[in-house]
Amino acid sequence: MPQVDQFESVFRSAIRDVFHHADPGIHSVLVVTDLDAAGAGAFAEKVKGFAAVLGEGEDLDWTVVTGDQFRTTEELQILIERESPDLICSYRNLHSRAWRFPHSLGEHLDIIVQRVPMPVLVVPHPEAGRAYEHALENTNVVMAATDHLSNDHALVNYAVKFTEAKGKIFLMHIEDDAVFERYLEAISKIPDIDTAEARESLAAQLLKQPRDYVNSCVAVLGEAGVPIELKCIVEFGRYLKQYRQHIEKESADLLVIHSKDEDQLAMHGLAYPLAIELREIPILMI
Amino acid sequence: MTATLLSASTAGAGHGTPQFGSTTFIFAFLLVAMIACLALEEKLHAKKSVIVGLFAVVGLLLAAAMGILPFGDVMLPNGHHIAMPVFIPAIDWGVICIIVGSSIFVDVTSRSGLFTWIAIKVTKASTGDPLKLLWYYGLMTVVFSAVLNNVTAMIIVGSLTGVSLKKLGRMDKLLGFLIIEGLLTNIGGLLTLISSVPNIIVGNAAGISFVKFFIVASPYVAVATVVTLLMGAKLFGIDRLATEDEKKEAAFLVSGFDENDRIENRGLFFFGAVMLLLFILVIATVSVLPVVKLLGMSFVALAFALIMLLCYKHEVDPFYKAVDWDLIIFFMALFVVINVMEHAHVLDLIGKGITMIIGDGKNSFGTGALLVSSAVFSSVTDNIPLAAMLAKILGAQGVESSSALWWAVVFGANLGGNLTPIGSASTLVAVTIIHKYKLQMSFGAFVKKAFPYAVVQIFMATVYVLLLMQLLQAE
């Protein structure tokens, strides 16, 4: 019955995903390094300065892990379980020289990011020298990126948590135009569907949902009196290329992304290439 | 004019002492076969218009061959004669125009986002509480069924129910909601003269005004709605939310609905709302409005449709396409079949049978029996042929417009649809939505679920009509 479907579409379209603002609650941070005590201390201080927005003194408990406290991934995992922090902070290619080759996170982070429930803040390697000048200075400009920005309260809440007062958050949703074109090519071969109309309606609908969600985030944070400017980047494009362009253009200090995918053991489809290739700024992987 | 044309075309039928010969029985068999085919519409995979259209063609051919049709010119009110195919004056163009006009008017008004705005506002007002939602959706079903047609009301409320219960995580209650809403469409369809086709046909034939229809029907509709909702909440276990957390969560979820989503043009939205109110007002007062009363309700429906179409004057085609042509052609063919049956004295034969039931029309048993038998008949086949035939028969027998017999037909024809899923188009829509959500609901299962409600509603209607009869007789 086409009319039932038409009205269902009308009502489904009227549903806005309302942002649910909640503090993610970060009270303890575990800084994992493969450095000696002095190097680890210096690295931890740098990170503390960068993440000052999380709190100071007794509000936030910092624990620093040095290189001699673990060697294998199992040992690191046991250590994390024992400390049970709210946030882990580390860098790529622990206990390895592979940081010279930008092709992996290293065996420790590859697994830890997937195995532990808490978010992992991956910062540029202290020796690699790839970080932007402004990286690890502050969190004035934070970007939250996803390929499906809707009802993603955790992503936005972590972005809010990490953004300094009067800072900016860019909520980015990129629709893959290659996938979109492939579907439209299939539609163009179906005589019952008007291709031009399908292109227009589908594109509008795909971008409408994330835009509505961003509007909801703006409204809810405004009502809560959070002193942060929220900006919306919702568009078609190629994931990596587009994200990189925006990060460079806005001089982003932090990128927040999802890393876990409950349907698979591997990392979330968008997270892995971003974590591998965007080595110039810190990435919060939740 | 329709009445004049009809009387001209039926001039040869004769209402004196009908002779029931073999011709009458051949056509009676044809009528029974058509009703059986309508009852088996789903099994035959044929649309109503095609089924009845085929019987109209066969009926006309047979009647012409047997020489029972009054061929000749039709006399106009000004005394002029006009040549016209014999089946054209057989059609009640007043009814056809009301249906075409109203459906275009409602469709264009719907485009303004008015009905979805109301539906979403109601959802938000419920704060997501299942029991409140059931009451609000139930009342909305009744009001929409009264203002729109039953099928459109069921489509709007049923599709919203599916979407909102899914959003609220209450899909376990969907079956109960949809069945109750389906049943309520037929109660809402009783509210006004234009709420359902049987009302239009019977009301027109009996000469009942819009206001009188509303005054008589509304007390029953109010009580039956409340009883149905109370029974529904009890039998389907639809309760209020227990804890504060549940209430907060539900309120948060429904707050996500945006009632303004479909409003493309604010001006058009308000214009649609004003026009809808005006439409109801003019329809209600058509019998006392100077000039307009001469043109009738069909003119009002078509005029309002045209005014609304002016808002989309460059793109009217989609609205014309949206008209239910199956329904329109079905009516046209049905009027032709009934006209043929009239000439073949089949209606006299049925009328004789009905007279045996209703007697002089002034005894309680007869009136109650007419209501119950109309309901039973409507439960297995379309209620429109029943309403059209009975209206014709009662009219031919000179039953007064104040008689409770007309109301027995109206209540029986509308409420019979609640006994089975094929009894009315709106319950069929409810079952279609139930199946769309992969819920199991066979014919028997529907009857089992709906039977208690239908029995209570028909019992209440019988008592109500009998009380009405006492009241009318006392007057």
Image (cartoon, rainbow, N blue to C red):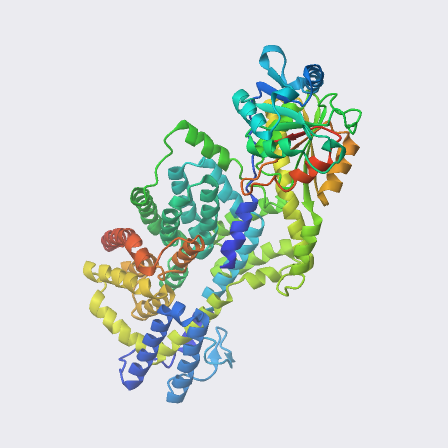
Residue that appears at 31% across and 77% down? B346
Above or below, B53 against B175 in this view is below
Q: Position of residue B97 (x, y in %)?
A: 50, 64
In depth, the one of B13 and B167 nearer the eye is: B167
Mark yes or no: residue B273 visible. Answer: no
Picture quadrant of residue B387: bottom left
Residue that appears at 23% across and 63% down? B361
In depth, the one of B428 and B100 nearer the eye is: B428
Of all residues, the one furthest to the top in this rendering is A57
Residue that appears at 55% across and 61% down? B322
Q: Position of residue A104 (x, y in %)?
A: 69, 37
Mark yes or no: residue B470 visible. Answer: yes
- Answer with left or right where residue A118 lies relative to residue B438: right
Location of the C terminus of chain A (image quadrant): top right
- Answer with left or right where residue A144 lies relative to residue B240: right
Residue that appears at 50% across and 80% down? B84
Above or below, B237 against B244 in this view is below
In depth, the one of B436 and B400 nearer the eye is: B436
Q: Position of residue A57 (x, y in %)?
A: 62, 10
